[in-house]
């Protein structure tokens, strides 16, 4: 059984019911909009976010579940999907998960309006049901995601990212949304504010480990059989590169910055950069950092009694670290 199927096992019924509720939450009187949202729903990914919401809700409440939990997952998916549709416009991206993006099929103007529609649907779903606590958790995440993106854009121009800034960027860009999923899962079943915060922290730790793993794919021989070097080509500052820049001579540093800034399309030079980062211990350092976050996340889980939901979350934490793509 694939790890994702194994993780989903204790919440299969809830996940199926959620799909119906999510489709319902998107319905509108505008046929064009319904066509587009139907297209979005049909090409969904692994659905990690609702899985986090449901597993955390069930783990902290001994298997209890409420209508609010479904709403929490729907709010996250609506608002997250809105940010993805807008991202594709910003990045001028024609593909998402192997399918055409909304802007590729219906052009930018419609894509921006669809993103706005999904955002408002998410807001209204929580306001109509007075789920203000859930709305606050997701709103903080959306604010931080925007800040993280802008901080990365600002820093990428100069390639002057310190390790602290790198962690702040990935905390905001990637981890804050998973933190919101876990916080909303706990809040939806009436947890205390301490427990909600503990689950938020758990989500943040997993999210950071997830992003570090993504950074490593650029340097390690993943499924494709060779390092990709895509982040280098896009001048993205990743942890292996930051560590290497801070642990080499001035001459080497100059060569490295020149390589990333001016020769990032040169395949031979990119290969040399990958090798240099490996030789300087950038990979080992990054792996050890990722494992630190994994250990902290597992420690939070271990404070809960054994249950199928806890087991699934343990599998999820390990899957994030061990996945091959």
Image (cartoon, grey):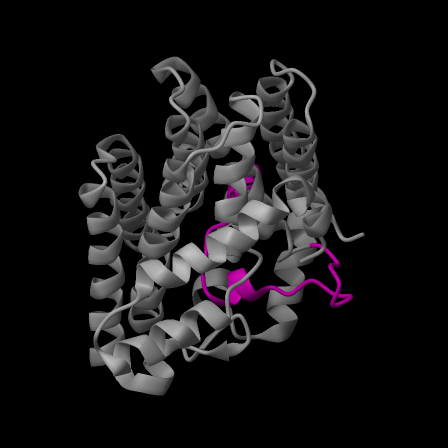
Q: Residue at x 60, y 48 (%)?
A: 13
Residue occupying the point 74% across, 68% down: 224
Where are the magenta residues, as a range? 220-249
Q: Most prominent secondary structure in the magenta stretch?
A: loop
Q: Nearer the viewer, residue 117 or 66?
A: 66
Q: Position of residue 95 (x, y in %)?
A: 46, 77
**Residue 192 percent location from the top left of the image:** 38, 15
At 27% from the left edge and 76% from the top edge, which residue is drawn? Answer: 33
Which residue is drawn at the image coordinates 30% and 67% (left, top)? 27
Residue 225 vs residue 295, the one in the foreground? 295
Q: The C terminus appears in which quarter of the rendering?
A: bottom right
Q: Position of residue 135 (x, y in %)?
A: 25, 38
Q: Residue furthest right?
A: 1
**Position of residue 300 in the picture relative to residue 19 (left or right):** right
Visible residue check, residue 169: no
Q: Is residue 302 magenta?
A: no
Instruction: From the top left corner, tell me how far across and down residue 107 is, in percent.
Output: 28, 84
Q: How many marks?
A: 0
């Amino acid at each position: 059984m694939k790890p994702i199927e194994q993780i989903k096992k204790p919440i299969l019924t809830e996940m199926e019911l959620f799909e119906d509720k999510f489709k319902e939450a998107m319905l509108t009187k505008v046929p064009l909009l319904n066509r587009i949202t139907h297209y979005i729903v049909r090409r969904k990914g692994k659905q990690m976010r609702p899985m986090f919401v449901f597993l955390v809700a069930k783990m902290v409440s001994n298997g209890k579940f409420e209508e609010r939990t479904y709403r929490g997952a729907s709010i996250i998916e609506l608002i997250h999907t809105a940010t993805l549709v807008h991202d594709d416009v910003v990045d001028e991206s024609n593909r998402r998960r192997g399918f055409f993006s909304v802007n590729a099929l219906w052009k930018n103007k419609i894509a921006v309006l669809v993103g706005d529609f999904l955002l408002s649907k998410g807001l209204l779903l929580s306001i109509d049901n007075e789920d203000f606590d859930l709305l606050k958790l997701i709103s903080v995440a959306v604010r931080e995601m925007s800040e993280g993106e802008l901080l990365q854009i600002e820093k990428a121009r100069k390639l002057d990212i310190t390790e602290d800034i790198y962690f702040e960027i990935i905390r905001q860009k990637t981890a804050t949304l998973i933190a919101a999923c876990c916080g909303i899962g706990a809040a939806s079943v009436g947890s205390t504010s301490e427990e909600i915060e503990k689950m938020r922290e758990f989500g943040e730790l997993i999210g950071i480990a997830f992003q570090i793993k993504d950074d490593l794919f650029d340097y390690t021989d993943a499924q494709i059989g060779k390092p990709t070097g895509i982040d280098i080509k896009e001048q993205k500052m990743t942890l292996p590169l930051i560590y290497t820049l801070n642990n080499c001579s001035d001459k080497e540093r100059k060569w490295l910055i020149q390589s990333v800034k001016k020769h990032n399309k040169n395949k031979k030079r990119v290969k040399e950069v990958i090798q240099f980062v490996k030789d300087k211990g950038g990979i080992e350092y990054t792996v050890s950092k990722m494992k630190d976050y994994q250990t902290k996340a597992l420690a939070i889980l271990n404070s809960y009694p054994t249950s199928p939901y806890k087991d699934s979350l343990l599998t999820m934490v390990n899957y994030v670290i061990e996945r091959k793509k």
